Image: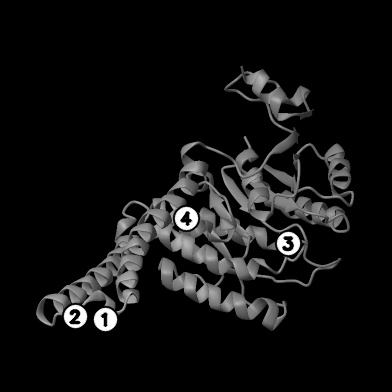
Amino acid sequence: MVEISIVVPLFNERGVVDELVRRLTEVMTKTGRKYELVFVDDGSSDGTIERVFDAQARDERIKIIKLRANFGQTAGIAAGIDHASGEIIIPMDGDLQHAPEDIPAFLEKIDEGYDVVSGWRKKRVDGFVSRRLPSMIANRLMKYLSGIDLHDFGTTFKAYRRDVIEQIRLYGQFHRFIPVLCRSVMKIKICEIPIQNIVRPVGASNYGIWRTVTVFFDLIRLKFLMSFFSRPLQMFGVWGLAMIGAGLLILAYIAMQRIFFDQTLVAMGSSIFLLAIALMLAGVNFVFFGLMSELMVKLYFQGHKVRCYVVGSVSGELPDPIYGVDRTKLRTRTTRDLLQAKR
């Protein structure tokens, strides 16, 4: 049985793969626990996957998930988690900005009884304007909205118990908010530990700076899903009713002017009447459009169990006791092969 799964999404990280595998293997071997390294190739085009296959040929504890295209970091992490076998799952970046030597600290906290252990980049080396300032603002907003006392929501480097993380479905860019999503569906124990933040030894980040922009939209979506998913009209209904109420007040004003002061609509101007109608229609549309759009997204990914990625092949799977499939004989197979074997 695998106890620990290290999940690493890779996108054009050919220059650091060998060093990453060496350090992960060295650290995990010292722990004395049974582990696996789950590498997810997120559509790399620089030969990253070949380097990982070379490493797998030397170490059968390496599992490779090759996606058919570049689906993004959240999808890469989701694919790795879905194919991980361990009872403790630790996602981390594949560019060596996360130090594998910090993993024992995560395991120590998990052993103390915590369900989620989050990394805290206490001393960041990224640019202040491009990364640290937006991250600081986003972290404070997230802390306020979620009620979870963490300094760093954005880092990928965290440890989860399997029975906790398997309760949520990742999509969009929600990988940075996994502790919040977990807390929204169950009571869990969360703690935070300082981790190293290292300058990339090779190249630049392959997941763009636009992540710091889209995070603010994610905060809005996440707040809705946390607070109003089961009772969405408490959010949209307030604004919708406010618009409808404003429209009715304007109509009442027009009626009073007509009844008590004999003012015609022509004298008052038709624009005030059109404003009242527009406000009422906007209020109704605001309620239904906002409600249905977010519910459709949520149901699409959770209700129908749709994944936010497409697997090209899975290499290094263990025997499947449920379906009786000897995956050790099928080192690399397509998704269609897996489904046929299960049938």
Query: Mark 3 or mark 2: which comes first in sequence?
Result: 3
- Please tell me the numbered disc located at residue 263: 2
Query: Mark 3 or mark 1: which comes first in sequence?
Result: 3
Tell me the SS state at disc 2: loop
Percent x, y of residue 43: 78, 47
- Please tell me the numbered disc located at residue 77: none
- Residue at point 66%, 58% (across, down): 103
Say left or right for 175 vs 269.
right
Q: State yes or no: discs 2 and 1 in contact (Cβ < 8 Å).
A: yes
Residue 330 shows in the view: yes
> Which residue corresponds to mark 1?
267
Say left or right for 222 vs 108.
left
- Please tell me the numbered disc located at residue 181: 4
Q: CA distance from mark 2 to mark 1?
A: 6 Å
Tell me the SS state at disc 3: loop
Q: CA distance from mark 4 to mark 2?
A: 57 Å
> Which residue corresponds to mark 3?
207
**Vertical side of 12 occupied by 337: above or below:** above
- Mark whose residue sits in front, 4 or 3: 3
Q: CA distance from mark 4 to mark 3?
A: 22 Å
